[in-house]
């Protein structure tokens, strides 16, 4: 592309605008209707990463956005390329990850008739995006791109979509990228801060519920300081892992299982929940406040959502870190946490530690995750796919830092782990990265391991192998249903990995896992570990949770 002011087409102007937004990577597939964009990218500083499926491209952009706070970008052609893209776009939107999806489209001269591969993509993407539009005038491209990134990255972040017809892409275009400007922080009203401080000071047994909004707002340090100063236990959602170090004496670890667990007792015994950066989609309040009787103080960047079980008595809306500092200064809560809270923490840790020496095989999921945690450093990253293993990862993989355990929990889409791990390795090439997946999720997007090999992003894929859709079988069992339609056969995962030029390992003893994982993480190419897992633990956990007593 030439210098600014020179003649260019719409696709070239679009790419200029993407460069202006700081885009480093675009994930996607080539197609006939996006040829002009591909040509412009061929002369751009942006690296186009050719994936093996559009869903993988969208998941890569999804996780890239969640880790960086900058919108990940994915590209597809029209029709089936765009429909393939939708799952990852929807996942980003519900999980609050900034993402910009760009699709090719038929020319505007063909939209009024039944046309090959034509779908109304603006209508199709409307339910799964914050905003989307079609470029119909070349000169509007800078405004559309700037608006797309501004909306994608604004709280609550999410997905946006730009549709570019092929004839518009080739048209001459005049214009320049728009300046981004500074985003002003908004701060909470002092009245709401005072009300929150008063409620917290008067509570006998308060409990903090921390969500992903704390991470997005870079408020983890402020939350930890407030909890420590005021002696308030903290439970985090699946997506809020690491908001307080897991080793902190006030950390109650993750809440969000659809069944009762030790941490549920904390909600049973609290007289005030302080919901910080919490979205309802992370864990329905009907699970932890079914009667709507627990008083709630909400602290967030945007107003609280509406739910009959979630009606805050106080809403503190503004910069989360600033709000927490102000509330901490105005609260006069004294003493230590309620003795029951201390006992609860001890019970949770004892349950976790009991698997440290377990040598059964196939491996129990608790032991597998316990050993994984021993190998991974505090800054290293795991990306969890969706399935039975996700429940165990949420319960047993504990974090000292935010964004070191990425779990899809809004849309909860299977197949995210391998593409997400690739994106994580691009963002943090010096960190260890592990994709944790079931054998079902692995087969959905394992083709992206070739992409990882090609672009040089080595990470480890750990397969919890049970020969079926374990989470669905778990649900069937808990409802006293006969397991049905959930079992399948698998290829030889080691041979499959080796046929792709990867490293493949099979675990044949519980003693094999730690050394094998360490070896796999040292490889210069992606590695796959096939580990048989004993999912009889699923039903045992359900039975145990049903018998859980929360007497103080």
Image (cartoon, rainbow, N blue to C red):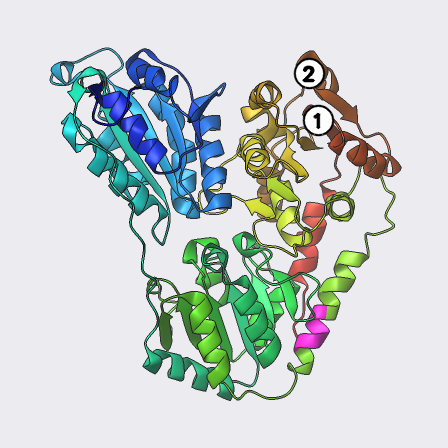
| Tag 1–tag 2 contact (CB < 8 Å) | yes
Reply above or below: 99 against 439: below
Residue 313 percent coordinates (x, y):
37, 77
Q: Residue at x 69, y 15 (%)?
A: 501
Q: Does residue 293 appear in the picture of this structure?
A: no
Residue 337 percent coordinates (x, y):
64, 81
Label at residue 496: 2
Q: How far apart are marks 1 and 2 (CA)?
A: 9 Å
Q: Main secondary structure of the magenta part?
A: helix
Left of 295 or right of it: where is 406? right
**Magenta residues, start to end:** 341-345
Left of 43 or right of it: where is 11? left
Q: Mark 1 points at which residue?
A: 528
- Is 343 part of what is drawn in magenta? yes
Q: Which residue is drawn at 75% across and 57% down?
A: 352
Q: What element carries label 2?
A: helix
Q: Which residue is drawn at 53% across and 70% down?
A: 208
Residue 476 percent coordinates (x, y):
58, 42
Left of 3 or right of it: where is 552? right
Q: Quadrant of the C terminus?
A: bottom right
Residue 397 percent coordinates (x, y):
68, 50
């Amino acid at each position: 592309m030439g210098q600014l002011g020179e003649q260019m087409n719409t696709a070239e102007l679009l790419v200029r605008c993407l460069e202006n937004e700081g885009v480093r990577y675009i994930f996607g597939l080539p197609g006939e209707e996006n040829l002009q964009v591909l040509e412009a990218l061929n002369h751009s500083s942006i690296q186009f990463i050719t994936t093996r499926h559009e869903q993988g491209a969208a998941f890569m952009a999804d996780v890239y956005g969640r880790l960086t706070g900058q919108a990940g970008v994915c590209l597809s052609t029209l029709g089936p390329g765009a429909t393939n893209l939708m799952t990852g776009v929807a996942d980003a939107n519900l999980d609050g990850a900034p993402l910009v999806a760009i699709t090719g489209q038929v020319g505007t001269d063909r939209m009024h008739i039944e046309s090959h591969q034509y779908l109304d993509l603006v209508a199709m993407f409307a339910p799964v995006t914050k905003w989307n539009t079609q470029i119909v005038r070349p000169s509007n491209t800078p405004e559309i791109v700037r608006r797309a990134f501004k909306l994608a990255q604004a709280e609550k972040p999410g997905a946006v979509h730009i549709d570019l017809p092929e004839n518009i892409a080739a048209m001459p275009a005049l214009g320049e990228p728009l300046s981004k400007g500074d985003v002003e922080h908004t701060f909470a009203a002092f009245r709401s801060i005072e009300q929150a401080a008063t409620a917290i000071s008067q509570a006998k047994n308060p409990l903090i519920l921390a969500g992903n909004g704390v991470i997005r707002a870079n408020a983890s340090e402020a939350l930890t300081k407030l909890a420590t100063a005021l002696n308030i236990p903290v439970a985090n959602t699946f997506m809020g892992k690491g908001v307080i170090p897991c080793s902190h004496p006030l950390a109650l670890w993750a809440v969000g299982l659809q069944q009762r667990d030790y941490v549920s007792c904390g909600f049973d015994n609290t007289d005030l929940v302080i919901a910080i950066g919490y979205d309802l989609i992370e864990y329905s309040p009907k699970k932890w406040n079914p009667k709507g009787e627990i008083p709630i103080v909400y602290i967030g960047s945007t107003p609280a959502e509406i739910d009959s079980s979630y009606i805050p008595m106080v809403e503190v809306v503004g910069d989360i870190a600033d709000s927490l500092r102000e509330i901490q200064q105005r609260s006069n809560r004294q003493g230590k946490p309620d003795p029951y809270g201390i006992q609860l923490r001890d019970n949770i840790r004892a349950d976790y530690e009991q698997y440290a020496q377990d040598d059964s095989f196939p491996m129990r999921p608790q032991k597998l995750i316990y050993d994984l945690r021993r190998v991974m450093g505090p800054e290293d990253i795991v990306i969890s796919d969706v399935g039975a293993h996700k429940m165990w990862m949420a319960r047993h993989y504990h974090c000292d830092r935010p964004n070191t355990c990425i779990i899809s929990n809004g849309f909860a889409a299977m197949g995210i782990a391998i593409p997400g791990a690739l994106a994580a390795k691009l963002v943090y090439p010096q960190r260890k990265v592990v994709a944790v997946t079931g054998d079902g999720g692995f087969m959905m997007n394992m083709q992206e391991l070739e992409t990882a090999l090609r672009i040089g992003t080595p990470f480890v894929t750990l397969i919890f192998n049970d020969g079926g859709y374990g989470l669905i079988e778990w649900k069937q069992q808990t409802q006293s249903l006969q397991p049905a339609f959930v079992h399948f056969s698998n290829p030889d995962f080691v041979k499959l990995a080796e046929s792709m030029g990867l490293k493949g390992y099979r675990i044949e003893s519980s003693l094999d896992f730690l050394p094998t994982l360490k070896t796999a993480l040292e490889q210069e190419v992606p590695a796959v570990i096939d580990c048989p897992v004993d999912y009889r633990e699923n039903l045992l956990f359900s039975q145990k949770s049903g018998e859980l007593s929360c007497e103080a």
